[in-house]
Amino acid sequence: MPEGDTIFRAARTLNRALAGRTVTRFESVFPALTRIDTDTPISGRTIDRVEARGKHLLMWFSGPIVLRTHMRMNGSWHIYRPHERWQRPHRDMRIILETDAFHAVAFNVPVAEMAAPDALARTRQIHDLGPDPLTEDFRAEEAAARIAARPALEIADALLDQTAIAGIGNVYKSEVLFAARVNPFASVAELAPADIERLIAIAVMFMRANVVEGTSPAIETYRGLRRTTGRSDPGARLWVYGRGGKPCRRCGSPILRRRQGPHARSTYWCPRCQGTGRDEVSGSGPQKNRAPLDRTR
Ligand SMILES: [Zn+2]
């Protein structure tokens, strides 16, 4: 699933290709979008900008009117030159937006809505979003306060809660917890304020490192290779995510994997660096869930 950094890079790529250009053709398989396009045509409008808000991608058209899309598991936006061959089958097309220079195509995007900016701002999906580490006005204290306000949640689930902090997905969840040496199954209430601050600082560092210029492929906007270890060879990009059974990069213990939370998302962690899980966590109290911050690269 695309996480905040992926959406940020996609928005940047789309913005570069589309901003300031006039829409020459708009087509969608979503009846709601087609209706709006019939009533107030998108064709002929200028694309003002494309931006990411958490895991949402917002396209601003003159009017103004905003197209919000969410990729969920398999959605993606591609940019093509006119007449360039698509890299995905036509049956996966959900939205086409053409300008004279570029065509933007949304494939398998499951969520798309068009609204006036003030109506969009009032929607639950946008209004309730927590602070986004990839925005310039990110406030770490507010993110920390929102996480602390969810004491009963396990910390891994709190990090995924988009209304607490926006943009963290399942990969960063495990990576950030490992780097901070916090047990994923500890409840927020069991953590010290310094643990939460450290988790947020690491999340900001990892996510920002992955949107540095040059990490984004030009065309395929959703296959950027995420990394948190600071190493670039494909087998060494991540600390724990997807590495169940493999040796911990710090201590050599086998990395464990367990389904966690209401959506049974996979959590990867090192039992030695981060504790073995709920039983030990509840038996040992918060002090033993913490380990000193170590070098992460
Ligand atoms: Zn370890």
Image (cartoon, rainbow, N blue to C red):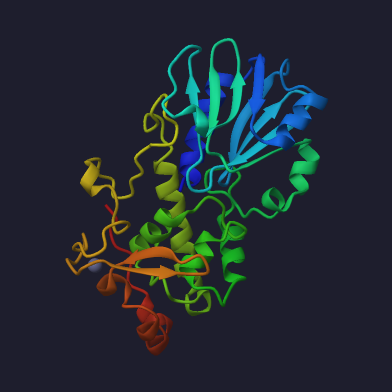
Residue 63 occupies quadrant: top right
Residue 283 occupies quadrant: bottom left
Q: Position of residue 295 (x, y in %)?
A: 28, 58
Along the viewing direction, whichever of 46 and 114 lies nearer the viewer = 114
Quadrant containing ligand 1 reads: bottom left
Q: Is residue 253 left or right of residue 267?
A: left
- Residue occupying the point 59% across, 10% down: 100
Along the viewing direction, whichever of 90 and 264 lies nearer the viewer = 90
- Residue extending farthest to the right is 39
Q: Position of residue 120 (x, y in %)?
A: 75, 42
Residue 147 visible within the image? yes
- Residue occupying the point 44% across, 15% down: 84
Q: Is residue 94 left or right of residue 259?
A: right
- Residue extending farthest to the bottom is 283
Residue 202 visible within the image? no
- Residue occupying the point 56% across, 25% down: 15
Q: How many marks?
A: 0
Q: Position of residue 185 (x, y in %)?
A: 42, 74
Q: Is residue 28 above or below residue 294?
A: above
Q: Is residue 176 above or below residue 89?
A: below
Residue 255 occupies quadrant: bottom left
Q: Position of residue 142 (x, y in %)?
A: 61, 59
- Residue extending farthest to the front is 91
Q: Is residue 50 above or below residue 47?
A: below
- Residue occupying the point 73% across, 15% down: 44
Q: Is residue 127 left or right of residue 111?
A: right
